[in-house]
Image (spheres, rainbow, N blue to C red):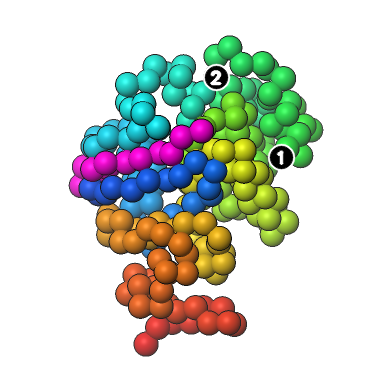
Amino acid sequence: MSALTAHGLGLSGRFGPADFTLPAGRLSMVIGPNGAGKTSLFHALIGHGEAQGEVRLGDHVLGTMTPAVRMQRLSFMPASRDIGWPMRARDVVALGLAPGLDRALVDGALERLDAMELGQRAVNNLSTGERTRILIARALVSQPDVILLDEPLANLDPAWRLRVLALLAAEAERGAVVLLSVHDLMLARQHQGDVLLIDKGQLIAHGPARTTMCDGRLAAVFGVRLTPQGMELAD
């Protein structure tokens, strides 16, 4: 599989411009304060709204791909868990299945999220955490080359946070580009892959967690510092 490369990436008045590369086979994390531009980064990557710049998957420009090809190559899970219509949860997962792919993949995605029983229920009657698992299944169902997830760990209990991280790590191991936003700075600091630090609509740093999340940057951006016991307010 191929790396995802952004040149001059931006969203008018909200994020960028930024240049970076997300390697295939690696799980990367996005961090930043509330309103920093994390969601805008994702929207720019998928070409939403007034997106600017160019995003390439290998030698192919995402913006020139047909909808069917894009659906098979890239998936996006938004931060919102709101689903107002009474569809079966498995039908929501099937919405992520690219044309021509085997519908048995829907069952496979539900099984990976331990959600076969949930699949028969109306999605608007599920808890927020259960809807999160269904939306993650939708993002994974086509086994895309690029998986973008905005706050996929929100609303999950501790066991499911670990299980979802393991699933996403497995997707990276098969060669996919995986990018997720998180608010847990301790989790991001312990992460073995790359971290993108966003603040005030700008990409402040990108690289290994230990260098990207240095104490000075965390104090300047978040107003906190990390200690062996957890987080504390920076002076």
Tally of numbered discs: 2
Q: Which residues are magenta?
A: 1-15
Identify the element where label 1 is drawn: loop
The structure residue drawn at horizontal position 57% and vertical position 53%, both measured from the top left corner, is 154
Residue at the far top: name it: 100
Q: Quadrant of the C terminus?
A: bottom left
Q: Quadrant of residue 122?
A: top right
Q: Is residue 74 visible?
A: yes
Q: Position of residue 161 (x, y in %)?
A: 65, 54
Residue 43 shows up from this direction: no
Residue drawn at x 46%, y 19% as measured from the top left: 69
Residue 7 falls inside the magenta stretch: yes
Viewer-nearest residue: 176 or 182: 176
Query: Mark 1 Cα within 10 Å, few/some/many (few <14, many 20+)?
Result: many
Give the vertical position of 75 relative to 181 (above or below): above
Q: Considering only vertical position in the picture, is 86 above or below 2?
A: above
Label 2 is placed on what type of residue? Ala
The reply, left or right, for residue 191 in relation to residue 107 is left
Q: Amino acid at mark 1?
A: Leu
Circle number at residue 55 = none
Q: Which residue is mark 2?
A: 98
